[in-house]
Image (spheres, rainbow, N blue to C red):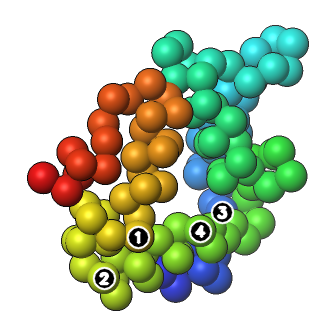
Amino acid sequence: AIEYALNGFAVTQIIGGYWENSVRGFHSTNDEITTMGKYPNAGQGFLDIYTVNGEAPVQGQRFKNPTLAQTYSTIANEGCDAYYRGSLTPTIVNFLQSIGSHLTIEDFND
């Protein structure tokens, strides 16, 4: 999984189509990012990570996700503590709070 995230994979026709539909779903008719109901930051986060220059990857294009590769590497090196009480915890909690969650670092540590 780390290898695929780091070096990418060729997008297939079917996956490219699904991806395009997902990207379209995050845009309203006036090209503003939708709010996904009560999660206003989720749509932009998806587009930041899973688009290439704002567009869905197309068939044959290589999609890379180096941030995911780094996350997987951290978990491989630190184990589950990376998630619950380690270097990933603040990032997870910050995102969750940005979309309205009340979870705290302490909740993950318990």
Going from N to C along the chain, the mark reached first, 3 or 2, is 3
User: According to the image, label 1 marks what residue?
Assistant: 87
Please give the label number shown on residue 78.
2
Give the residue at the far front of this rendering.
106
Q: Is 101 on the left-hand or right-hand side of 22?
A: left
Query: Identity of the amino acid at label 2?
Result: Glu
Task: Kindly report the distance in space between the C-alpha atoms of the residues bearing marks 1 and 2.
Answer: 9 Å
User: According to the image, label 3 marks what residue?
Assistant: 11
User: According to the image, label 4 marks what residue?
Assistant: 67
Q: Closer to the observer: label 1 or label 2?
A: 1
Marks 2 and 1: in contact by CB < 8 Å? yes
Query: Identity of the amino acid at label 1?
Result: Ser
Could you tell me which residue is drawn at 59 percent across and 51 percent down? 15
Query: Identity of the amino acid at label 4?
Result: Thr
Task: Kindly report the distance in space between the C-alpha atoms of the residues bearing marks 1 and 3.
Answer: 31 Å
Total numbered badges shown on the rendered structure: 4
